[in-house]
Image: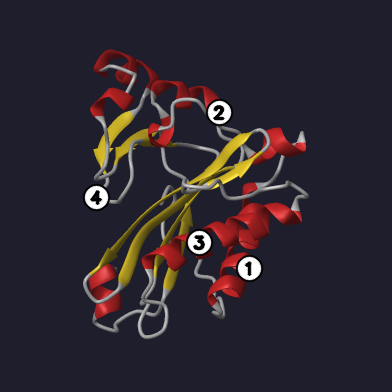
Amino acid sequence: MVRARRAGEIPDTLILLEHPHVITKGTGTDEAHILAGEAERAGRGIELFEAGRGGDVTYHGPGQLVGYPILDLKPDRKDLHRYLRDLECVLIDLLARYEVPARREEGLTGVWTPGGKIAALGVRVSSGWITSHGFALNVSTDLSFFETIVPCGIQDRTVTSLEREVGRSVPMDEVRGRVAEAFARSFEREMEREMERAAGR
């Protein structure tokens, strides 16, 4: 899809999905931050995957909304720092809809609440300023799976989820729609929803 966007064959696209249990490694991964050995990962049904994005190790799984923006940042958004801050803004905006006080942390990437880190970012920008990878927002995630890693290499911080912050169940479809709305506002785009092409994708 990055190649197709670069060639002008598809428009700017935002993919929103849930992954099965997987630990992904970014280009800055410290192997010591993967705490679960092969046997434990197999027992818990966790795959290990080289993602090709920036950043350290992270976990994806059911109940976590993962966003993959495939955007052409030319001509007026060719600034990686701004792009990361814009993605954080999307998630802070979304969380405000649920009255969750979310913020950035000085010197760190991601989105935080008083209860911990609620969203991680890891991006890649290819030649031609086409983006890939993106963000992961914990909605109803089983947070015990984060015990298998040092999330994003940060030793002394906890993780949280939207449902933990609001104290109730939150429908994933509702969050998905609100993320798309917040993304459209931040990136000044009009959204056209394309339904899932196949179950499980």
Rendering colour mode: secondary structure
Residue 24 is situated, as x and y percent measured from the top left of the image, at 32, 38
Q: Nearer the viewer, mark 3 or mark 4?
A: 3
Mark identifier at residue 85: 3
In the displayed structure, 192 sits above or below 91; it is: below
Assess disc 1: are there few (<14), some (14-19) or many (≥20) residues with their C-alpha within 10 Å of its C-alpha.
some
User: What is the C-alpha distance between the residues marked 2 and 3?
Assistant: 21 Å
Say whether residue 22 is left or right of residue 14: left
User: What is the C-alpha distance between the residues marked 1 and 3?
Assistant: 17 Å
50 or 15, which lies in front? 50
Which of the 4 image quadrants contains residue 20? Answer: top left
Asked whether residue 196 is in view, the answer is: no
In the displayed structure, 80 sits above or below 51; it is: below
Residue 46 is situated, as x and y percent measured from the top left of the image, at 35, 27
User: What is the C-alpha distance between the residues marked 1 and 2?
Assistant: 28 Å
Please state the total of marks drawn on the protein image. Answer: 4
Residue at the image position 54 percent from the left and 71 percent from the top: 193
Q: Nearer the viewer, mark 4 or mark 2?
A: 2
User: What is the C-alpha distance between the residues marked 1 and 4?
Assistant: 28 Å
Residue 165 is situated, as x and y percent measured from the top left of the image, at 71, 37
**Residue carrying label 4:** 52
137 or 123, which lies in front? 123
Q: Nearer the viewer, mark 1 or mark 4?
A: 4
Say whether residue 36 is left or right of residue 145: left
User: What is the C-alpha distance between the residues marked 3 and 4?
Assistant: 20 Å
Q: Which amino acid does the dot numbered 4 rest on?
A: Gly
Which of the 4 image quadrants contains residue 76? Answer: bottom left
